[in-house]
Amino acid sequence: LYRQLPAATLIVTGGVPDVTEHTLTTADDLATVAASWGVPPEAILRAREPVNTEAEADAVARWVKPGELTLNTALFHT
């Protein structure tokens, strides 16, 4: 998807309770994979605090305006 929209920003989400700067989160793992696939690190935003789908949506809403979002998600949500 990023290759089709090279000017886009990739937002990755996924946290754990009581996250600290030293905690490795799902968002960190996803950012690492995206970078290994060629997405520039400066094009990746990480939402490291959310621990459920609703909190992830709230976090992403801080960065996007209506109509500016392409959502790619998984079938399983908590």
Image (cartoon, rainbow, N blue to C red):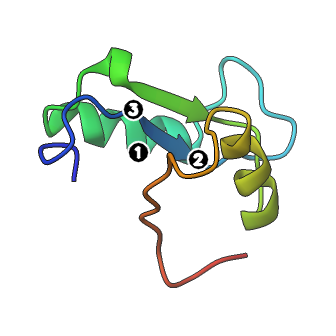
Residue type at mark 3 is Thr
- The crowding category of the residue bearing disc 1, from other C-alpha atoms within 10 Å (few below 14, some 14 to 19, many at least 20), is some
Secondary-structure class at tag 1:
helix
Q: Which residue is drawn at 47% across and 61% down?
A: 71
Q: Marks 1 and 2: CB-CB under 8 Å?
A: yes
Q: Which residue is drawn at 63% across and 40% down?
A: 65
Secondary-structure class at tag 3:
loop
Residue type at mark 2 is Thr
Residue 30 spot, x, y in % from top left: 41, 45
Residue 40 spot, x, y in % from top left: 24, 21
User: For mark 1, what is the residue?
Assistant: 30
Q: Residue at x 12, y 43 (%)?
A: 3
**First in residue order: circle 3 vs circle 1:** 3
3 or 1: mark nearer the eye: 3
Residue type at mark 1 is Leu
User: For mark 3, what is the residue?
Assistant: 9
User: For mark 2, what is the residue?
Assistant: 13
Q: Residue at x 80, y 63 (%)?
A: 54
Q: Quadrant of residue 36?
A: top left
Q: Distance between the residues labelled 1 and 2?
A: 8 Å
Quadrant for the C terminus in the image: bottom right
